[in-house]
Amino acid sequence: MLLAVHGMGLGAVWCGLYPVIHLTRRMKQLLSLPETIIPVGMISIGHKGEERAAADRFDDTKIHYERW
C-alpha cells in the first residue's frame, strides 16, 4: 500500500499502534472494531508537505555473518 500511494504522487507513513494500549483502544473505538480485533498499525496518507532527500541509514557494523 505504501508503494501504491507513492506511485500516485502522495505521501504515506506507517504508524505503529501496538503494544501501546491507549492507542489500540482509541482506534478500536473510532472504527467500532470487535473486542477480538487488535489494531497493530495504521497508514496515514496525504499530500506531501515537503520533498526530502533520501537518508542513507545503512550501517555495515550492524551486519553479522554467523557471529555476534
Image: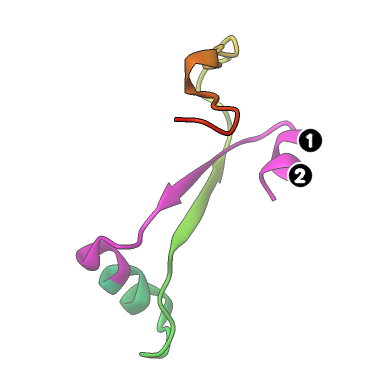
Q: Does the segment drawn in magenta span residue 14?
A: yes
In depth, the one of 66 and 23 nearer the eye is 66
The answer to whether the residues at label 1 and label 2 have Cβ atoms under 8 Å apart is yes
Occupied quadrant, residue 58: top right
Q: Does the segment drawn in magenta span residue 43?
A: no
In depth, the one of 17 and 47 nearer the eye is 17
Looking at the image, which residue is at 76% across and 44% down?
Answer: 4
Which class describes the residues within 10 Å of circle 1: few (<14), some (14-19), or many (20+)?
Answer: few
Relative to 23, 66 lies left or right: right
Q: Is residue 12 above or below residue 15?
A: above
**Looking at the picture, how far across and down is residue 32, in whole percent?**
40, 83
Furthest residue in direction front, as rendered: 67
Looking at the image, which residue is at 71% across and 35% down?
Answer: 6
In depth, the one of 56 and 48 nearer the eye is 56
In the drawing, what numbered circle is on residue 64? none
Q: Is residue 55 above or below residue 19?
A: above
SS type, badge 2: helix
- Which residue position holds label 2? 4
What colouring style does the render use? Answer: rainbow
Which class describes the residues within 10 Å of circle 2: few (<14), some (14-19), or many (20+)?
Answer: few
Looking at the image, which residue is at 56% across and 45% down?
Answer: 45
Residue 49 visible in the snapshot: yes
Q: Which residues are magenta?
A: 1-24
- Which residue position holds label 1? 7
Question: What amino acid is found at the position of numbered circle 1 in the picture?
Answer: Gly
Name the quarter where the C terminus is drawn.
Answer: top left
**Looking at the picture, how far across and down is residue 33, in whole percent?**
42, 84
Question: What amino acid is found at the position of numbered circle 2 in the picture?
Answer: Ala
Looking at the image, which residue is at 44% across and 83% down?
Answer: 37
